[in-house]
Image (spheres, grey):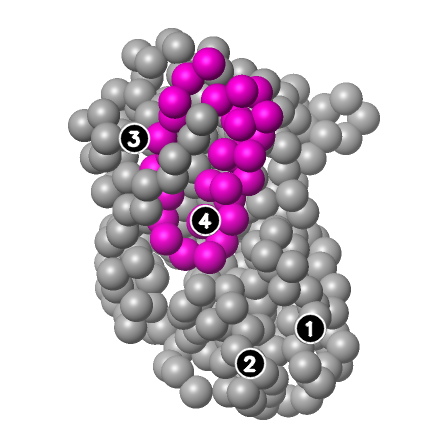
Amino acid sequence: MAHLRIGSRGSQLALWQANHVASLLRSQGHTVDIEIIKTTGDKITEVALSMVGTKGMFTKEIEEALAAGHVDLAVHSLKDVPTELQPEFDLAAIMKREDPRDAFISVEFSDLPGLPGGARVGTSSLRRQSQLRALRPDLQVLSLRGNVDTRLRKMENGDYDAIILASAGVHRLGLTKYVRYPIPAELMCPAAGQGALGIEIRRDDERMRSILTFLDDADARATTACERALLNGLGGGCQVPIGAFAERHSGKLRLNAICGRPDGSELLREQAEGTDSEMLGQQTAEALRKKGADRILNDIYGKQVAVPGQP
């Protein structure tokens, strides 16, 4: 048995995730400590993430601690992990996936179609913003930062009529009081890797890889590899308006993907099936490129994105 050190961000959700993994490792007889590491994304709290544009903003400092040997493994929300890892690291386990969909959350309103014109909807994501504005151009889409409980408190205080968060996060924290329903993936395509936890190690640490084998889920690895291949094929990070959602269907993988303008004026969709995760993701990315995704993304990367203001 081993003494293991987990590197984690300090947010309520990140610590839930780290403690969840720690509990599973302890059940195997290991002793576990959690080291809290503050990342760039945690330090930048007043600026919309889409304006920062830093890949790995929630992982870089944790990877530095991993490389230096201060921690033995890192637990991440997979959607925060860059699609191309530095060569010295590897994802040793992708854990069984929680609900990957986004959740509609509101004190007063029961669903997205029931929101009145001009209603204030909070989100931190250009992906959600793009799809919301395509679905309901009459809504006010407003920026929303902070931990899950902070975002919920802002809504309860009346700053927003509704907010959109990842279903997995609110369910993991048990903060489901105002969750009205998960938004179907065909209406709001999730982020690549949403709902999955990735465990990162030093690539040459075979002992650690062996210890973590029991946490790796084949279905989660296949579907998220497909989604991340699409994201990588479009050159996107976690803060661009790209969605990807893969699921098993009749023995194959079915991938739904979107790429859109933040103002909702253009939203490209593509669906494809295949058996090879990475090839399917790459081919679907190419299909979106042929439809005009490059033009959209070049416009976004080439200038500052219009980010909604605070209420």
Q: How crowded is mark 3: few (under 14 residues within 10 Å), some or many (20 or more)?
A: many
Task: Tell me if label 2 and label 1 are in contact, CB under 8 Å.
Answer: yes
Q: What's the distance in space between the residues labelled 1 and 3, CA to CA?
A: 37 Å
Alpha carbon distance from label 3 to label 2: 37 Å
Q: Earlier in the sequence, mark 3 or mark 2?
A: 3
Judge by depth and name the residue closer to the eye, 281 or 157: 157
Residue 15, disc? 4
Circles 3 and 4 in contact, beta carbons < 8 Å: no
Q: Which residue lies furthest to the left in this view?
A: 68
The reply, left or right, for residue 37 in relation to residue 75 is left
* Residue highlighted by disc 2: 155
Image: magenta residue range: 1-30
Q: Which of marks 1 and 4 is nearer the N terminus?
A: 4
Residue at 36% x, 73% y is 307
- Say what secondary structure mark 2 lies in: helix
Q: CA gap, disc 3 to disc 4?
A: 15 Å
**Element on which disc 3 rests:** loop
Residue at mark 3: 71
Residue that appears at 33% across and 62% down: 49
The amino acid type of the residue labelled 1 equals Tyr
Q: Is residue 212 magenta?
A: no
Q: Where is residue 150 in the image (x, y as percent from the top left)?
A: 47, 72
Q: What residue type is labelled 4?
A: Leu
